Amino acid sequence: MSYRENERKKAIMIREALFRDPGAGLFSKIERDFVLQNPALNLWAGVRDDAIQYFEDNRVSWWMGDKNEPTGHLLSSQVACINHLYFLRQRKDAATAVLKNLTDKIEEAVRVDNGYVEFEAIGKENHLGERSHTRGANATSVDAIMVGRKKEGSNVLILIEWKYTEEYREENKYIPDRYNVYNTLLDEGNCPIRATSYEALYYEPFYQLMRQTLLGWKMIQAGEYSCDEYIHIHVIPKDNVELRNRVTSPGLKGDTMSEAWKSVLREPGRYKVIPPEEFVRPAFVCADTQSIKTYLEKRYWNGPDS
């Protein structure tokens, strides 16, 4: 049984106890046991109302949700990202603990948009020259960004891409509408990507990683958030081997997805794959974090009988 199938089964088993929802909500116009009838319950109660308001105030699109509420799909990675990270927005102590665990360069977390985490970030300008510059849809984005201040005073941009049950097949996305935009950037002499075949980059998840790397690079060049370097974090559950261990691009070399991606980076140390519990665990040494920790354990980290 695949990781996705296991997580779907677990979500159904814990649904009524954790969400008090009978399921059978609509997804793609079909009733499904792993979709809540009340989509708002998909967000942890401690951040639910604030997160929904944040998306509305910032005109951020929900993945497969209605205009002003998230999807009821219990395996949504966007929802998983918010459930794991939204509580950090107003907690400098917890945000700092998380960032310092990523690199010893960071002294403290820095506010980015009235909080310490910005969701569905696309940069302040259309750095990649894409047709759209809309948060959450039709533009290159990362699920979240954070910023850390270094000892010497400049900042580090942390790009966070959150995965849950995603898996990808070998599908070539190398079409003119895309390569006419990104290949020009890849041609620049100081580009952080050095692939011998650009076409090899146009297979998911590498196509997304390529665009996010270009975005981080251009945000640094523009001096956004006073950052002079970036770190690209790929949050993937350790048991999702369908994503972690599959190389979907025939033009990239490596035994795992991360090895294949690092093979085309000029500075591979700037890219890190980390499980969700490992990413947020440093925050739980801080006060008043037990309730969110318990929720994440029950919903995402433990088996259905834990």
Image (tube, rainbow, N blue to C red):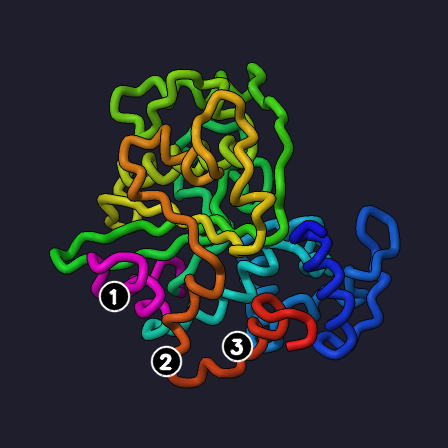
Where residue 238 appears, x then y in whole percent? 52, 55
**Which residue matches tag 2?**
286
Residue at the image point whose x is 84% and y is 57% from the top: 32
Residue 132's place in the image compared with 160, above or below, is above
Residue at the image point whose x is 39% and y is 43% from the top: 124
**Amino acid found under the numbered disc labelled 2:** Cys
Q: Is residue 117 left or right of residue 203?
A: left
Mark 1 crowd level (few <14, some 14–19, many ≥20, 10 Å Cα): some
State the separation of the CA atoms marked 3 and 1: 22 Å
- Range of residues picked out in magenta: 95-115
Of 255 and 121, the residue lying toward us: 255
**Amino acid found under the numbered disc labelled 3:** Ile
Label 3: which secondary element: helix
**Which residue matches tag 1?**
108
**Which residue matches tag 3?**
292
Label 3 with label 1: CB-CB less than 8 Å = no
The first of marks 2 and 1 along the sequence is 1
Q: Is residue 111 magenta?
A: yes
State the separation of the CA atoms marked 2 and 3: 12 Å
